[in-house]
Amino acid sequence: MSKRNGLVGFWKFMYALMIVVYHGAPFVNGGNFAFFRNGYLAVEFFFIISGFYLAKQVDNNKNDTNKLGVETFELIVGKIKKYLPLVLIAWLIGLFINFIYYDMNFYKFFTSFFDLFFLRMSGLKTFVINGPLWYLSAMLIVMLLLYPLLRKHNDKFSLIICPLIFILGYGYLNAHYSNLNLYSNEWLGPIFIGLFRALCGMCFGIFISYLSSRYKDIKLTKFGKMFNFIFSSILLGIPFIVSTIVKQPAQFDYVLLLSIGFGILIITDESKVLFSFSNNKIFMYLERFSMVLFINHWNCRLVLLKVLNKDAGYITNLLVYVLSAIFICVIIDFIANNKKVKYFFKIIKDRVNDLYFER
């Protein structure tokens, strides 16, 4: 097995779990306590790390840019192929749940199809079958913009435009909203606020990727790597602690955002942190499972909001909800990675490629 930094996979899983717990807030009955009250910052974690690895992908691409359009199209198709099985499963289950427990009509049914094409953040009115799918829509649309710019103007874009975007962008959000607990479908004028958050977060990740490559030649001792491991764990763990013990954690959103960013900077550089213990199948599975959990926990939440008794208490209901979500998502992960299911989606991808290249 090739060496793999499983620390990234571990923290992806932890931040996916943070989102699951954050979405369990409606189970609170009467009391004010809830775990991870600004768990929405986990989405920022995923945007930052997506921007980071997008920049790394560009750095590793030594081809010329004569076919940049085709290259960008193939990148997006590859991402869609990766996520579509999970999205389709989540959409079908969510559709059934909405027909059973919620007020579903034909208008909602037909507009929900936009989620299957990752278009919710485009501005098209979409009935929300699955809440977290806005993240994938925002990421892919922003990626469609950032990738060709990075390939064409890598250093200028990474060092000038990206810092300007995330500094001024987060500054605007801070000045107008004071925190990042924002409704993704709120219309800013030209774009949804969720798309704006994706742009700021991914540009932050691109800049962090540059910092990572700039200092990659610095050698550390084993003690230095151990210190970095502990320090990065503190940086990435602080949002979990603050969002639980602080009564109004939203006021610290932008400080915690920096904590997340610099934590990602450390853990993604294998030469600066101890990671050999994470080079195994367990951590690799956690990385894959994190996206399954991120997308598919929502349906479990929809059902349990209807059937659980709030009088049972927040902790009890939260435990039932989280364990049920993990159990269901393990099953969904097994189905999505079944060889026959993968073959079905391979046929779809090949057909899309054929239609494109026949033009």
Image: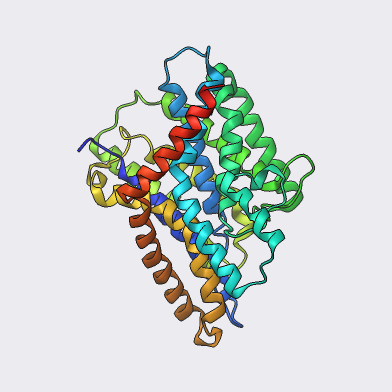
Q: Residue at 59% of width from left, 22% of height from top?
A: 149
- In the visual, does 282 lie left or right of 260? left
Q: Residue at 55% of width from left, 69% of height from top?
A: 97
Question: Percent from the top left, x then y, of residue 52?
Answer: 48, 34
Tell me if residue 98 can be seen.
Answer: yes
Q: Residue at 51% of width from left, 81% of height from top?
A: 308
Q: Nearer the viewer, residue 283 or 269?
A: 283
Q: Nearer the viewer, residue 22 or 245?
A: 22
Q: Residue 218's image quarter?
A: top left
Question: Percent from the top left, x then y, of residue 238?
Answer: 47, 55
Q: Quadrant of the N terminus?
A: top left
Tell me if residue 231 can be seen.
Answer: no
- Look at the image and name its color scheme: rainbow
* The residue positioned farthest toward the bottom in the image shown: 311
Q: Residue at 65% of width from left, 36% of height from top?
A: 167
Question: Percent from the top left, x then y, of residue 283?
Answer: 29, 50
- In the visual, does 173 lie left or right of 17? right
Q: Nearer the viewer, residue 51 or 274?
A: 51
Q: Quadrant of the C terminus?
A: top right
Does 320 appear above or below 85? Answer: below
Q: Nearer the viewer, residue 156 or 55?
A: 55
Number of marks in picture: 0
Q: Residue 246's image quarter?
A: bottom right
